[in-house]
Image (cartoon, grey):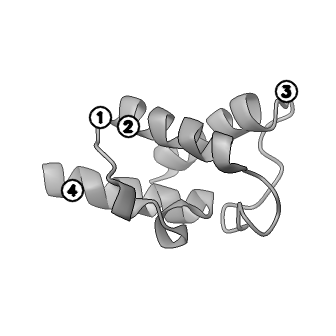
C-alpha cells in the first residue's frame, strides 16, 4: 500500500500543488476540506489513477469515500486491483 500512497503523493505534489517540496499533508487529510483539489484536479487525479494502475473508474465511484484523501484513494485502488486479480 505504501507504494501506491507514494505515487499518489508525488502526483498531487507535482501536478496539483505544483510543489517541488513533496506533498505537505498527512495521508488522512481531506482533499476537499483542505482545498487540496478542485473539480479540474479531481478529473486529473481520476485520469492519473486509471492510467497508472490500469483500472477503470465509474462515475458512481467518484465519491468522497474513495477520493477524499491519499489514504482513501490508496485503499480504493487496492480494492479495485484485488477484484481484477
The residue wearing badge 4 is 82
Q: Earlier in the sequence, mark 2 or mark 4?
A: 2
Of all residues shown, which one is farthest toward the left? 85
> Within 10 Å of the Cα at label 3, are there few (<14), some (14-19), or many (20+) other Cα atoms?
few
Determine whether the residue tagged by mark 3 lies in a helix, strand or loop.
loop
Report whether 8 appears left or right of 54. right
Q: Earlier in the sequence, mark 2 or mark 3?
A: 3
> Within 10 Å of the Cα at label 2, are there few (<14), some (14-19), or many (20+) other Cα atoms?
some
Q: Quadrant of residue 14?
A: top right
Q: Earlier in the sequence, mark 3 or mark 4?
A: 3
Report whether 43 appears left or right of 31. left
The residue wearing badge 3 is 20
State the CA–CA distance, disc 1 to disc 3.
Answer: 26 Å
State the CA–CA distance, disc 3 to disc 4.
Answer: 32 Å
Decide: marks 1, 2 in contact (CB < 8 A)? yes
Determine whether the residue tagged by mark 2 lies in a helix, strand or loop.
helix
In the image, which disc is placed on residue 6? Answer: none
The residue wearing badge 1 is 54
Q: Nearer the viewer, mark 2 or mark 4?
A: 2
On-image quarter of the N terminus? bottom left
The residue wearing badge 2 is 50
Determine whether the residue tagged by mark 4 lies in a helix, strand or loop.
helix
Report whether 35 appears left or right of 7. right
Q: Earlier in the sequence, mark 1 or mark 4?
A: 1
Amino acid at each position: 500500500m505504501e507504494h501506491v500512497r507514494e505515487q499518489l503523493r508525488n502526483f498531487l505534489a507535482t501536478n496539483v500543488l505544483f510543489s517541488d517540496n513533496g506533498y505537505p499533508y498527512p495521508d488522512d487529510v481531506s482533499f476537499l476540506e483542505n482545498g487540496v483539489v478542485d473539480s479540474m484536479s479531481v478529473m486529473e487525479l481520476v485520469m492519473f489513477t486509471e492510467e497508472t494502475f490500469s483500472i477503470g473508474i465509474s462515475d458512481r465511484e467518484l465519491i468522497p469515500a474513495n477520493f477524499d484523501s491519499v489514504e482513501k484513494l490508496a485503499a480504493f485502488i487496492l480494492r479495485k486491483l484485488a477484484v481484477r486479480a
